[in-house]
Image (spheres, rainbow, N blue to C red):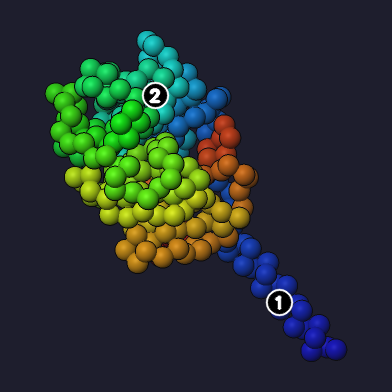
Amino acid sequence: MRWLLSFLFIWINWEVYSQIKNDLGEPLSEISVKELDQVSLDTRDQIYVSNLQGDIFLFDATGKQLNYFSPARQAKLSQLEAAWSVTIFSFSEDLQEYRILDRFLNPIAERNFLDASVNLPKAATLGNNNIVWVWDESDLSLKRMDYLRNLILDIQPLNLITSVKSLQISALKEYKNRLFALIPNEGVLVFDNQGNLLLDLKLPKVEKLSLYKDYLLWLENGNLMGYNLSQQTIENIQAFTASVDSYVFVGQTKLLLVQGEKIEIYPIPDSLKELQ
């Protein structure tokens, strides 16, 4: 009996230790934005946030607001991309236009996709070497554009090269010379930097294109999950307590947990640092 009690004591304490080990702890700081919508990190862990009107807020890595941009024509942004640091990209499906800003949120360029014969843009992002990727739902094609000339360079008809039943692409992101396309409740398509299909990932729980090292990250059933792009395997990275519809982004030294209208800023946990 004494042996059993000792075993239970050790087991309970191990469970408590595991929970503490897997917990992110207290956030370093928090950001609250009314009607928070899109979130992106640059390479210096500065945080860019948009609201439902298309206003863009810039915060430093500690959560201090540095700048603010409000467009003349307000509309919800479908995409906000700051990963290139020098230039910030925003796209509005409602306005069918995209905007390039510098890292201080000063506008550099503003283009309408209709001027480039993109008839129904549903997702768009900034790529390397003045490239803009756009998903044109009118002809179910992925298009690669030169934004300086507002000119289409390549067209890839996805209905001919994928087995996806519903091509409802909601987001695009270029990362390490690959383009990722998110299809809600279906998964993620991965292309090379010329638009050739590499992978068709059946990952219906992925809701945001959150990438770190060689992993695609998402939250599922109280766990931080990762798809290893090199090994093509799914890994349970760590237990992760968060509300439904929460998501994470990982920068150079910070992890963002986005929940509703609040962003919590944490140091990157060891479980992510140790990933190869």
The C terminus sits in image quarter: bottom left
The residue positioned farthest toward the top in the image shown? 72
N-term mark: 2 or 1 = 1
Tell me what residue is drawn at x 44 percent, y 49 percent: 187
Give residue 91's position: percent from left, percent from top. 35, 26
Q: Which mark's residue is nearer the viewer, 2 or 1?
A: 2
Tag of residue 93: 2
Q: Which residue is mark 1?
A: 11
Describe the element under mark 1 as helix, strand or loop. Answer: helix
Give residue 158's position: percent from left, percent from top. 30, 42
Please indicate whether residue 22 sits to the left or right of residue 139 in the image: right
Tell me what residue is drawn at x 58 percent, y 42 percent: 245
Please indicate whether residue 165 sits to the left or right of residue 142 in the image: right
Residue 24 visible from this viewpoint = no
The N terminus sits in image quarter: bottom right
Give residue 23's position: percent from left, percent from top. 59, 57
Going by the numbered disc 2, the residue's amino acid type is: Glu
Please indicate whether residue 203 sits to the left or right of residue 101 in the image: right
Tell me what residue is drawn at x 38 percent, y 23 percent: 92
Going by the numbered disc 1, the residue's amino acid type is: Trp
Figure label count: 2
Comparing 127 with 241, the one in front is: 127
Give residue 55's position: percent from left, percent from top. 43, 20
Tell me what residue is drawn at x 41 percent, y 20 percent: 94
How far separated are the C-alphas under marks 2 and 1? 53 Å
Above or below for 173 versus 276: above
Describe the element under mark 2 as helix, strand or loop. Answer: loop
Q: Quadrant for residue 30, please give it.
A: top right
Residue 168 visible from this viewpoint = yes
Bin the neighbour count of mark 1 within 10 Å (Cα to Cα): few under 14, some 14-19, many 20 and up: few
Comparing 228 with 84, the one in front is: 228
